[in-house]
Image (cartoon, rainbow, N blue to C red):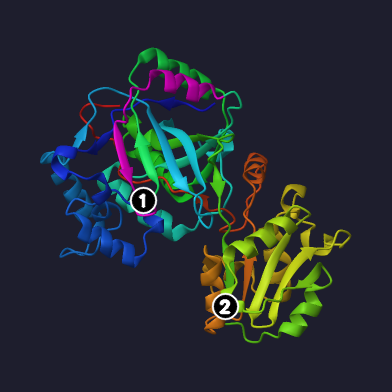
């Protein structure tokens, strides 16, 4: 069963930093080199100096991050809450590609007792890579702190946890910041023992699915196992900081991630069309001015077709543009027989198995290493890669439904890489979990 706990969060001291937007960041794995440079310029205490530090004089970014972290605690750039709390967290955001459409996502921050996947409490929905986990483990060992959140989904149809926390949340917000994408992040804090006890009780019977943060969750598991051998009394390593978001939240949004294929030895559009025709109905897409086609129009085409069945758009330049819709009676068993039923109808699974692997010869190892494949969020950027001849073809996708992520994760089914892009991201730096906080949990 899920065990959550309130904690004394470490957080930025507004009296010292002045503006939270100057010190908080997107999650470490979403920080591009350009963003890293911008964060470094924004403020000398920007969190990037801890989570994605530039190499310094010693050459050890992890030890240097740990020393900077300790300096910020000593000079009260970072301060601790006086009592254990749960932290309600709302995000108001504009839906990308839909100007003027705003949504609100609600969740709350707490500590979670780590549980191995085999225990059936926490479930993953995607595979992880060894490189990112090794990097995060070194940072965790050096700092003994969680700087970002694991994004956890749970089901609460009646909204019991939200009701309990809303009733106990004081207004106005404890912390508020608008990030570079225009998302307004608001954080409250609830220290009322009765409200905390109620939420802990509600969550005790829940199953959890990781939406974002698989690498960091598995890193925390590894660290906890190491500490259990090295220092059995170090129980605080057995927890991780997480934001819990109900599956039923109206603000829960997954964006599509488009596939850009490049560096194939040979690619012929006509042969590709003939080969894929065995599985997909082809609808040529024709526009008077291809360069003026709005992404929203293509999204509408995808959404409309997607309601009938798995679909995606293939674009290889100029008049090589088509909507591919799965044939209703196509025999896919030779290629999907090893997959459970829950995965066989997902757009990303069909694209990877039938098209990327079977027809284009991009095997799963090449996909994992991104040898012939790039992932792009924006339709315009994916198509631009083809127009500029940096890619041979791109595939424009519908998002994976949240319910499909949930159901497959609980069933133990792992989706292809980049099948989900939950939006917006949880901001890093609002709360920190420091295992050596003298105030304790």
The residue segment tinted magenta is 159-181
For the residue pair 313 and 151, the one nearer the viewer reads as 313
For the residue pair 175 and 222, the one nearer the viewer reads as 175
Residue 183 visible in the snapshot:
yes
| Above or below, 395 relative to 152 | below
Q: What is the quadrant of residue 398 in the picture? A: bottom right
Q: Residue furthest top?
A: 194
The answer to whether the residue labelled 2 contacts the one labelled 1, judged by CB atoms less than 8 Å apart, is no
Counting other residues with Cα less than 10 Å from the Cα at mark 1, is it few (<14), some (14-19), or many (20 or more)?
A: many
Residue that appears at 35% across and 39% down = 227
Residue that appears at 56% across and 54% down = 255
| Above or below, 375 relative to 408 | below
Q: Residue 355's spot in the image, x, y percent?
A: 71, 70
The residue tagged with tag 2: helix, strand or loop? helix
User: Quarter of the image containing the N terminus?
Assistant: top right
Q: What is the quadrant of residue 333 in the picture? A: bottom right
Q: Residue 351's spot in the image, x, y percent?
A: 69, 65
* Label 1 sits on residue: 137
Q: Residue 63's spot in the image, x, y percent?
A: 21, 54
169 falls in the magenta region: yes
100 falls in the magenta region: no
* Label 2 sits on residue: 291
């Amino acid at each position: 069963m899920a065990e959550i706990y309130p904690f004394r969060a470490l957080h930025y001291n507004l009296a010292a930093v002045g503006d939270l937007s100057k010190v908080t960041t997107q999650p470490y794995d979403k920080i591009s080199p350009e963003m890293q440079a911008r964060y470094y310029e924004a403020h000398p205490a920007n969190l990037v100096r801890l989570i994605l530090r530039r190499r310094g004089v010693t050459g050890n970014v992890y030890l240097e991050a740990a020393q900077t972290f300790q300096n910020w605690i000593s000079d009260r750039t970072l301060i601790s809450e006086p009592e254990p709390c749960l932290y309600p967290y709302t995000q108001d955001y504009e839906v990308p590609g839909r100007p003027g459409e705003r949504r609100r996502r609600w969740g709350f921050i707490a500590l979670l007792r780590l549980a191995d996947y085999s225990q059936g409490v926490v479930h993953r929905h995607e595979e992880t890579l060894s490189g990112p986990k090794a990097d995060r483990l070194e940072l965790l060992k050096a700092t003994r702190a969680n700087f970002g959140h694991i994004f956890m989904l749970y089901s609460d149809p009646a909204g019991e946890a939200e009701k309990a926390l809303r009733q106990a949340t004081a207004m106005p917000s404890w912390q508020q910041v608008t990030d570079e994408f225009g998302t307004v992040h608001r954080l409250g804090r609830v220290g009322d023992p009765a409200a905390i006890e109620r939420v802990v009780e509600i969550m005790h019977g829940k199953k959890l699915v990781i939406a974002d943060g698989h690498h960091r969750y598995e890193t925390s598991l590894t660290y906890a196992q190491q500490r259990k051998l090295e220092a059995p009394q170090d129980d605080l390593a057995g927890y991780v900081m997480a934001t819990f978001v109900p599956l039923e939240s109206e603000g829960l949004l997954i964006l599509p991630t488009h596939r850009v294929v490049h560096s194939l030895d040979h690619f012929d559009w006509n042969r590709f069309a003939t080969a894929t025709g065995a599985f997909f109905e082809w609808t040529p897409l024709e526009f008077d001015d291809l360069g003026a086609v709005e992404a929203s129009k293509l999204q509408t085409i995808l959404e409309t077709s997607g309601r009938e069945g798995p679909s995606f758009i293939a674009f290889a330049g100029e008049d090589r543009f088509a909507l591919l819709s799965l044939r209703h009676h196509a025999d896919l068993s030779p290629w999907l027989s090893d997959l459970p039923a829950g995965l066989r109808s997902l757009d990303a699974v069909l694209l990877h198995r039938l098209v990327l692997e079977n027809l284009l010869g991009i095997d799963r190892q090449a996909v994992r290493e991104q040898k012939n494949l790039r992932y792009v969020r924006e339709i315009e950027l994916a198509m631009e890669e083809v127009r500029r001849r940096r890619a041979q073809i791109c595939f424009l996708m519908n998002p994976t439904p949240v319910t499909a992520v949930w159901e497959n994760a609980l069933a133990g089914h792992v989706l292809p890489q980049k099948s989900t892009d939950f939006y917006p991201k949880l901001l890093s730096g609002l709360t920190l979990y420091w295992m050596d906080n003298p105030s304790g949990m």
